Image (cartoon, coloured by chain):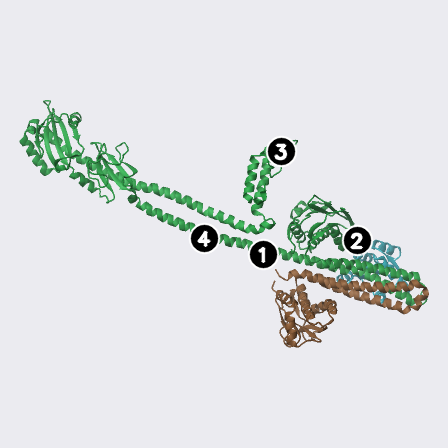
Amino acid sequence: MAMRFRPVWIRQLGFLIQLYFPGNGSEPYYENTLKSGDILFDKRDQKIMNFKNLWTDLTKGLLHESGHEATNRYRILRRNIFILMILITIIPLIIMAVIYQHEYHSSIKQEIVIPLQTLTHKTRHTFELFFEERLSVIRFIASSYSFKELSDQKTMNRIFNVLVNEYCCLVDLGLINKKGIQLSYAGPYDFLGKDYSEQKWFQEVVVKGTYISNVFMGYRKFPHVAVAVLRRTEDGEALILRATIDTSKFDDIIASMGLNPESDAFLISRSGIIQTSSRFYGEIMDQCPLSFPPGNYEPIVTEATDPRGREILVACAPFSSAEYALVLVKPKSDVLHTWHTLRSKMLFIFISSVMLIILVVLKLTDTLVKRVKEADEKRELAYREIQHTHKLASIGRLAAGVAHEINNPMAIINEKAGLMKDLVAFDDQFRKKEKFLGLTDSILKSVERCRAITHRLLGFARRMEVQLVELDLNELIQETLGFLEKEALYRNIELVLNLADNLPLISSDRGQMQQVFLNIINNALAAVEDEGEIVITSWEEDSDTVGVSIQDNGSGMSEETLKSIFDPFFSTKQENGTGLGLAITYGIVKKMGGDIKVKSKQGEGSTFTVYLPKKTKIGPGE
Amino acid sequence: MNKCEDKEVAFFGKITAGITHELKNVLAIIRESSGLMEDIISISPEAIVKYQEKIQNSMIRIKEQIKRGVNLTDRLNKFAHSTDETIAKIDLQETIEQLVTLAQRFARLKHVELKTVPPSQEDPPVTLVTRHIQLQMVLFASLECCFTVMSGGGEINIGIRKLEGKNTVHVVCKGDLPGQSEFSRNISESEKWPVLQEIADCLEGSVDLDETAHGIVMRFPDEISR
Amino acid sequence: MKNLKILLVDDEEEFVTTLAERLELRGLQARTALNGEAALQMIEADTPEIVILDVLMPGIGGFEVLRRIKAQHPQIPVILLTGRGSEKEGVKGMGLGAFDYLMKPLNIEELIKKMQEAIESQP
């Protein structure tokens, strides 16, 4: 698989999949190093271990830099912080907005629905009262007068005239007997003698005792409603008094609802025929286009779309006393006007908040990452400065050591030459030929010694420019030891070298490697007592790595000390020592792509082991 | 970070290498002298008498070279210790004298003689708190600048003068030189001039062409900001 | 000065034997010891009248030898030999009881003069 070219997260997703769905033939990234004979882990432990590896890999990719990816690190950091902050701020905002929207919607709806219900309820009550009132007058008349009186036309007329004056909307009044024949009639029509026995209303009033009709088109094509009551007299006569009312009062009642021009209210019959004038939904006697849920007595508010395409709220309140229902229609946009204003306000606030948040987060993230970058750069700079100072100081110390070392052989030459002079002065004969030869020979030996010392320094001085070279670690170690041998000699410290033959060369920076080994060996010399021993071993660790260990039999370190040994400014030396030597050494080795480990036991000694890659990962000029 | 720190190690290496070369020369002479004596002595006891003078000269030479070698190692030691502290209290005259000693060999190659101007007795010694290595670097760079424009050789005098301000170092060139304005122009066009300015900058000092004499004037603050 | 018993202590054999020879040519007998332990043994066996002592030696080191000499034979003057640029060591040595110090490479005339001073300063 060309894994290299896929972005990190896809690869990691792939691992996760492979982890839980193994066995598709391709090698999992985390090698299953268990062989069939191993009984140390079961599959689950293996998965846990693989998961741990996966987690380290994930976080390593996200949080740690690794060479060339360092430059992307800030971009990734910026992106991650931005996303995180946006999510943290906007998600609650969205949740809040959604919740508020929901709550408001339902509460507003409530506030709209309830008044509608109330209005409908009240108006229906008014209608029912109206009907009841009409019925009670008719009932009163039916009760107060005898059958005989009512069947008298003159009486009927008289009653009618009184009623008309006192009583609104009356159109006609008449008496009908139990056979359904109109016996008397006062009114505009000519119903005298009419037979209603076949008519439904008659059958109903006979059974129920009262009757209220739906609207019908009557005299001069105005809408009318008929009401009738039945009274059974003592002598078995059925007295049916019937009156017709016009619906002008209906309109008044409806008008009193005080609806705005977009709304509509009207009565309908049980079968949905419009009973009073409707603004939008048809003429009287038309079928109402709206549909209504099967009635309870309580007014129900439903949402619907009317034939004109408007979103409407419909309140429907069926009458209990008559076969009517009061319908109230309010357009949603009307009632929900406040809701819509609120909603658009909320949307505006939401959008501007989001934009503001994004702007602020962008700026903040930018500043934050810039600060982080600056801090990192400052730290890097400070580290480099310290490293430089440390390097220069150790170079200085080496050179001073050399100056010191040359002293002895020069003192010897001095004495030898002095002795020669003395011999010449004290003995004219020059008999000491062999003696002289011995002396000149000594001089030459000392000169050679000085030469070796200065040669070492010269080589060191010459190579002070930073460069990436093929290094022979054995040779470098021996050169470094050359500078420190005298001290070891003075203190009777034995230096044992187990340097591997044919140790592969490593590509590295000579100056820095010198610094590393100078530091570690110096530490070993400091740790070890006089007459102690330091063993330096080098070997090829694997195909990519070379290892060097420096072991001393000094006082060793406690667990505590071991933990902090590479920390900056940690020092076990009371007086001198900046505490930076090992920290810098650690830094150099790590930067080279290598590793450094310590093992120590108090009273037995310490071993520092340095692993170096054959091919270094950094560039020159560090 | 002081941007001249990159050059410090190279400078250290250059000077150290110079001293070491000289030491090698010292050793070479000792070896030759000793070898000569050996040769003479090997011939016969009589030869010793015959070439007595040669033997004596050899011994004198060896003694002289030892003295010279000791001087060199003293110088190396002092120089090596200038890395002990990045910023230190420095006696300017002493530093100039030491640097001149270190630079002699480079000057010799260019047929230039270096001389230090002794300080006047009345003036107190000038002490600077600054970067020791870089101070030596700037003095050395000023000499190098002069070397490049004194192709015929000559003499350079370097010293502290109290005329203009406190910490002024004058580098004055003598010899078969063109007119002052042309000489100054040559200096400012030499390849070492921008390097010199950069190091003076790192030390928070300044370097200018001398308007009255053939040479360079350098000024340094009493104390460098850390 | 002629019969002065001198003990030279220095780990550089070539140096110390040549110096002894030169002193001998000048009529001064000097024994040599190549390290601190040998020096102390020789002092016990046959007490010298003056000790010329190198400070930088392996083993028990110059300063320790100085301490012990001053502890057991305080009357013996000790002249220290130091490396160059090591005034500190010389001063330290004098603090421990050395008469004076000289820097290597030596000037033999100077050494003899110093030894004379040391002997004369003895009560």
Q: Which residue is mark 2?
A: A489
**Residues marked 4 and 2 touching at CB (< 8 Å):** no
Label 1 resides on the chain identified as A
**Sequence order check, earlier mark of 3 and 4:** 3
Q: Is residue B123 above or below residue C36?
A: below
Q: Give residue A156's position: percent from left, percent from top.
A: 7, 32
Q: Residues within 10 Å of mark 1 (few under 14, many from 20)?
A: few
Q: Is residue A303 above or below residue A445?
A: above
**Sequence order check, earlier mark of 2 and 3:** 3
Label 4 resides on the chain identified as A
Kind of residue indicated by mark 1: Lys
In the picture, residue B120 is in which quadrant?
bottom right
Q: Give residue A423's position: percent from left, percent from top.
A: 91, 65
The image's mark for residue A359 is 4
Residue C101 in sight in this render: no
Residue B135 in sight in this render: yes
Residues at marks 2 and 3 on the same chain: yes
Q: Residue at x 42, y 43 (%)?
A: A95
**What is the C-alpha distance between the residues marked 2 and 1?**
43 Å
**Sequence order check, earlier mark of 4 and 1:** 4
Q: Residues within 10 Å of mark 2 (few under 14, many from 20)?
A: some
| Colour chain C is painted in | cyan
Kind of residue indicated by mark 4: Leu
Compared across the picture, whether B199 is left or right of A282 comes to right
Q: Nearer the viewer, residue A461 or A409?
A: A461
Chain in brown colour: B
Q: Nearer the viewer, residue C27 or B182?
A: B182
